[in-house]
Structure formats: structure tokens, C-alpha cells
Amino acid sequence: MDITIQDYLNILPLIIIAAGILISVVIEMYAKNSEKILPWFSIVIFFSAGYYALFTVNSQSVLFSNMIVTGGTANIFFFLFCFGAAIVSLLSIDYLKKAGIYFGEYYILLQSAVLGMMLLANARDLVMIFIGLEQMSIPFYVLAGFNRKKHFSNEAALKYFLLGAFATGFIVFGMGLIYGSVGSMSIDAIMTKFGDVSTNAVFIIGVLLFIIGFSFKIAAFPFHMWVPDVYQGSPTTVTAIMSTGGKAAAFSALFIALSPFFGDVSFNIFKPFLSALAVLSMLFGSIVAIAQTDIKRMLAYSSISHAGYMLIGVTSGLASGTAGVIFYLAAYTFMNLGAFGIVSMLEGENDTNLKIDDYINLGKKNPLIAGLLSIFMFALSGLPPFAGFFGKYYVFISAIESGMTWLAIVGVISSVISVYFYLRLVVLMYFKEGNEGINPTVSNTALLGVVIAALIVILIGLFPGSIIELISTFVI
Amino acid sequence: MNIYDLIFYLFATITVLSALAVVSTKNIIYSAYNLMLTFFGVAGLYVLLGADFLAIVQLIVYVGGILILILFGVMLTNKVNGMPIHTEVTNIIPASITIGLFAGIVLAFFMNTNWKSVTTEFPATTIQSLGKLLMNEYILIFELLGVLLLIALIGAASIARKQ
């Protein structure tokens, strides 16, 4: 195995982040004001890795004896994770001060979580998926409980850790069964032997367990019970990256493991299971979100229903569905980051200002913030011309193409339900008489992050055609 | 029945019976000691399969490390707030159903799989080939595990820090 310069250039995003972790540890050790240096250092490495990944999206290669791939969809995911994390770092600077958890380790853990997500997205081997999953989850467990003084934060960390470890158990057991039936952990070997094993019960149950394990991570319906508590209890900026990057990474791993099935009749075995997950997640998330009074909980339930929409694209089993889900994830990452970003900006000390009623009259008191939040709410509810609409559009089209029109219809119904709770927030901000509501002080760096997220959401909404074309060229 | 079959049944019995005792005993200390026997039995099964390195690692890491940690954890936390740890065997019916289902699936696999029996020489040691694999095919994973352990350490330290 000879590694050329070109190979090193192809995995440069991974090298940047991994080296960044080690340098951050050194900075944290020796610099006196490391908590001031580290956020900007993280932003620089996230931005350079994300930009480089997008820049080299065409140089596809398979490296390290079929362990990882570079280029193509992997690089698109790299871009999502790195830009998402850069925005989260911007949001965190003032949020951590406000929450009293102003420590440098936060950024080291954030970088390692991003490294794990990247490993999940470019894995080509089940062992690699496992390492990536752990590399992503362990920092998340710690970050969820980063605010140790807070009871809720500790509860969130413990819940996330126990259920996450349980889900990992499912995934590893599934991998064991897949290995037992195929005799190899490599996705390429699974693809070559696919004809022999596609009807093998051991193999099917292994893949099913794998899907169940990752359903925990993407927060689909019957495996969602940790989501509201963990999203509510974790520091808001951590929730932002957990609900976007973490979900996108889990979806990418699901695509890698299911890729041998796409275009094959044996995928029909999973269709009832996956479509049940999709329908239940969409309806449950949308309906329960209506009853929420806490904005973080509301966004948590909305994230469950978004997992359902994305699962429609997976269920279709078509290349257009995969491309649609990746587009959806791109849109969802930035609109959800923006929404959580604004929540983190407005949040007061000791968990105040987190009720939906606190947002009353925000339109008069701070028109800029209210306008940005309205953009994200319109985008999340799927109203045109914002990014969310086109994400849903591509996913629903793929369902119709694969002959599952009913799934698209349920999706539309659920979107209509969800419009109620997204737009209720907008109505409260603008059309409520009286003078109650909070008077927020706004952090400039966080505002910058939110504005960038809003710009990306608008850009994706303006040029959906060229973006989906770019994604489709890499999805086989 | 040769001597290897006898050793296999011995270790298998130790593993299964001690595992049963782990979940059924009411005293958590007894559970921990029974877990030691389970780990030991599994290590014996590894030896019979010719996986010498795995067996030794199983003994060193699980019996020598993790189990001692569990015992220390139980003994130390018992005294923290003066309250005895409440231990009880609960949810017997749901657990039996789940495990019965699971055992049924495993048994079905076992019966339906077309086992091929091959006689091979046991390798004298597996360490050399494991090392070669780790340094060639799995080099990336080997390196990344280093990063993973570093992060686990940093995470543990940041959870345990003083405010």
C-alpha cells in the first residue's frame, strides 16, 4: 500500500481536524487565556477544513485498504459538519460565559465530535463506522452534561449516555451478524457477496438491528424517548450541533450500510419497517410539538418529525431519494442551527427566557432577531421559497417515483400540522397586543453566526436546482 | 467425547450458570463476583477457539481491570450518603419474554445454518498475525483509536473537574 501526496491531500480535512484537536490540547495546557483563543482557533480549522472539502469535492478515491472514501457525498457531509460546527463555535463564545461554563475543553470536545461525524460520513467499512460513531458520541455525552451545576444537564448526559450505549449495543450486534453471514466487514465485500446473502435471514436481521441502532441516533419515533429531555437539558449550543450534525452523520452511516441494497429487490424487506418509522416519526413529532410550551422541547419534537421526512427518502431506495435526503440535511442543518442559535442568544441566566410566551412582542423590541427567527420558522415549516420547502419537495418526489404516493401524502399532512406550531411563534412575535415579553441583550458574534446560517438557508432556497444537481452526480 | 469436549462443556457450564447468578442474585457484590466467573469462562472458551491473545486480554482487562473497578465503585458509593443501595430483581416477565425471543432467534440460526466443519492446525500464536493486521490493513483504525482514547480521557477529566 503506497500512499501518495494526492492521498494525503484527499484526506486533508480529516488531518486538519485531528491535528486541530491535538494543538487545541496544547493551547489549553499552556495558554493562560485559552478559552479566548480556542473558539477562534476552532472556527479557523472548521472553516478551512469545510472549505477545502467543498473545494476538492470532485477528487474521489478509496484509501487505507478500502477503509475510507474521499470526495463526493463524503465531502458534502464534511462541509455540512465543519460549517455547522464553525457556526456553533461563534454561537458558543458568549453563550458559555452566560451559562457559567467558560472552559476550553468545550472546543476540544466539539472538534472531536466533528471528527467522529466525518469518519462516519466517509467510512467504507463497518469497523470504521463503529469508530466514527464512538468518536462522535463520547464527546456528545460529555458535552450534554457540560453544565455540571445544573440538575437538568446532568440528567441529560446520563440519559443520553445510557440510551446511546444501548443503541451502540444494537449496532455492534447487527455488525456481528452481518460479519457472520458475509465473512467480512468491508462494504465492498458485502457488495460483491450480496447476491449470495441478500435472502439470508442472519444478514437481514443484522441489517435490521443496524437500522434500529441508528434510529436512536437520528431520533426516529419509537426510539425517540431520550430526545426531548436531552435536547432540553443540554447547553443550547450543544443541542444545536447534536440535533444537526449528529443526525446528518447518523443518516450518512445509514446510507453507507444500506448502499448494497439500493436498486435491488431485496430492499423491499425493509420498506414496511422504514416507512412505519417515517410515518410515526412525522405524525408524532408534529402533533406533540403543538402542546409544548418550552421552545427547546418544541424544537426537539420538530427534530423528530424532520427525521421522519428524511426517512421517506431512505425508504424510497432510489438515488433521487438519497440525493433528496442529503439536500434536506443540508437545509435542515442550517435552519435548525439558526433556530437554536437564536434560542441560545435570547436565553437568560439559569434557564430563563426559554418559554414560548417569552417571545411575545419580539418583533417590536428587536426586529432583526424576530425577522431572522421568522426566516428559520418559515424554512422549518417548509414554506417556499426557503430551503426547507425544496428539501421536502425532493424527498416527496422520490417517494412518488418509487410508487409510495401514500407516504408523500402523509408527509404533506404532517407538514400542514407542523405549520401551526412554527407559525404560532411568528404570530406571537408580531401580532400580539400588550407590552409583555423579554428585553434581550444580543451578542454580536452569535448574531454573526445566525446571519450566516440565514444567508445559507436563503441561498439554498434560491438555487436548489444546481445544488441537487451537484449532489446527484455523486449519488450512484 | 475427547478431552477438549469435556473442557468446553466445563467452561460453558461455568459461563451460563454464573451469568444466571449475576442477574438473579439480590446482593450486588455477589453479582459482581459471579460476573468474574462469567468473564473467566468466556476466556476459557476463547482459548479453546485458538484465540490466545483475546483470552489473555479478556482476563487482564475484564477480570483484572473492569471487575475491580465495579467492586470499588459499589463499595465506595455505598458509603457516600449512608443509604444502602437498593437492589432487587425486577421485571422478570418482560425480561424472560425478550430473552426467550432472542434465544429462539439464535437457536433458529444455529439449526438452519449449513455448518462446514474444517480441521485446521491451531496457529502457535495469533499475536504476530494480529500485529501485522493492525499495522497494515487496520492502521487508520489503530491510529484513530488513539485519538478516541485521548478524547475519552479529556472528557472524563472535564466531567470530574473542580468547579
Image: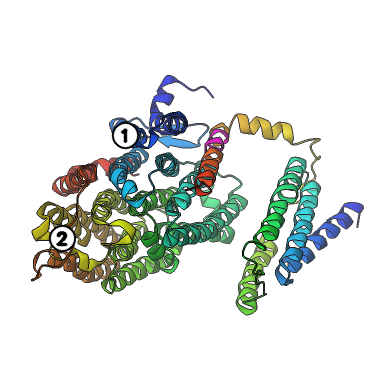
| Chain letter of the residue beneath label 2 in the structure image | A
Q: What residue would you read off at disc 1?
A: A40
Is A179 drawn above or below residue B26 in the view shown? above
Question: Which residue corresponds to the image point at 57% horizontal and 61% vertical from the top-left?
Answer: A201
Whether residue A230 sits left or right of residue A451 in the image: it is right
Q: Amino acid at mark 1?
A: Trp
Q: Which segment is the magenta one?
A: B142-147
Q: Nearer the viewer, residue A80 or A293?
A: A293
Percent coordinates x, y for residue A193 in the rendering: 54, 47
Q: Nearer the viewer, residue B72 or A223?
A: B72
Percent coordinates x, y for residue A280 in the rendering: 36, 70
Is A442 drawn above or below residue A412 in the view shown? above
Whether residue A470 sits left or right of residue B21 in the image: it is left
Is A397 drawn above or below residue A128 in the view shown? below
Whether residue A155 sits left or right of residue A197 in the image: it is left
Percent coordinates x, y for residue A468 in the rendering: 23, 46
Q: Give the residue at the far bottom of this rendering.
A: B93
| Chain letter of the residue beneath label 1 in the structure image | A
Task: Tell me the quarter of the picture where residue A402 sits.
Answer: bottom left
- Label 2: few (<14), some or many (≥20) within 10 Å? some
Q: Which mark is residue A472?
A: none
**Residue A42 counted in the magenta span:** no
Q: Nearer the viewer, residue A341 or A7?
A: A341
Q: Tell me, yes or no, if residue A438 can be seen here.
A: yes
Q: What residue would you read off at disc 2?
A: A383
Quarter of the N terminus of chain A within the rendering: top right
Q: CA distance from mark 2 to mark 1?
A: 35 Å
